């Protein structure tokens, strides 16, 4: 078996720690780094250090931000009566791309997964409940909480848990994003779970 020098092997091992990166991908990344000019690598290292030093969690919604509160929570144009709960910051970005949602967000940074040892205490959920009170939301009463967790077993479990948590706390809508047929797909290629969701979420036209 081919053995690399210690610095190269160490770099490969570090890349393998990244999610979705196996041994072969880690090797490719390591040798890509070795071929780049030193100035380019210094910029890369600088960017890594800067993101660790300057990025913090928003005190209100848990978004990753370099200003606290984040740009969404501090915006005067956002609709404060709606809060959309998502699993990760990149889910927020996906929703923002639609340009149709103008409310606020709450980021959990994960989903419930007993297999992985992730319970309610491991999610950033505790600061959601105080946000529902007008005194903690610029005097605005939250009328709807939209649960936009992923359509996975973990995401569904998380959505159900949050719904059970919120329903006794007052008369407000607790909604779940619709799931079903993706636009542009063919029925013959859709799995049975997606088709079942599409049938359940049908609407009038």
Image (cartoon, rainbow, N blue to C red):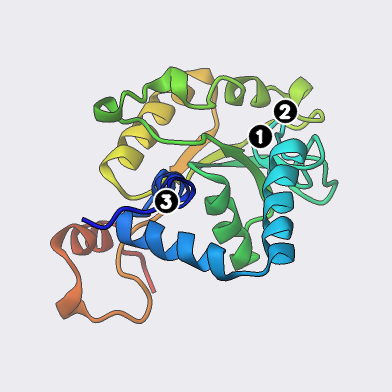
Marks 3 and 2: CB-CB under 8 Å? Answer: no
Q: Nearer the viewer, mark 3 or mark 2?
A: 3
Labelled disc at residue 162: none
Residue 80 visible in image:
no
Q: Nearer the viewer, residue 88 or 116?
A: 116
What's the residue at 35%, 30% (across, down)? 112
Mark 3 / mark 2, whichever is N-terminal = 3
Q: Quadrant of the N terminus?
A: bottom left
Q: Secondary structure at mark 1?
A: loop
Please give left or right for residue 98 compared with residue 74 in the image. left
In the displayed structure, 90 sits above or below 57; it is below
Which residue is found at the position 20% from the left and 78% from the top? 187
- How many labels were placed on the picture? 3
Disc 1 marks which residue?
A: 61
Residue 77 in picture, x, y percent from top left = 82, 51
What x and y, as percent, mark residue 47? 72, 52
In the displayed structure, 173 sits above or below 116; it is below
Residue carrying label 3:
5
**Quick check: marks 3 and 1 in contact, CB under 8 Å?**
no
- Asked whether 186 or 55 is in front, the reply is 55
């Amino acid at each position: 078996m081919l053995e690399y020098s210690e610095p190269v092997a160490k770099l490969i091992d570090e890349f393998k720690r990244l999610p979705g990166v196996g041994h072969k991908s880690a090797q490719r990344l390591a040798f890509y780094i070795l071929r780049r000019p030193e100035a380019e690598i210094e910029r890369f290292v600088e960017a890594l250090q800067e993101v660790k030093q300057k990025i913090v969690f928003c005190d209100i919604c848990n978004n990753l931000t370099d200003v606290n509160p984040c740009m969404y929570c501090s915006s005067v144009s956002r609709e404060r009566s709606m809060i959309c709960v998502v699993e990760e910051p990149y889910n927020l970005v996906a929703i923002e791309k639609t340009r149709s949602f103008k409310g606020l967000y709450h980021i959990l940074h994960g989903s419930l997964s007993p297999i992985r040892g992730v319970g309610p205490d491991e999610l950033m959920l505790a600061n959601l409940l105080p946000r529902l009170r007008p005194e903690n939301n610029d005097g605005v009463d939250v009328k709807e909480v939209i649960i936009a967790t992923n359509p996975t077993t973990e995401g569904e479990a998380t959505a159900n848990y949050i719904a059970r948590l919120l329903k006794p706390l007052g008369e407000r809508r607790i909604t779940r994003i619709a799931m079903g047929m993706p636009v542009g797909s063919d029925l013959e290629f859709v799995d049975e779970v997606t088709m079942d969701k599409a049938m359940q979420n049908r609407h009038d036209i």
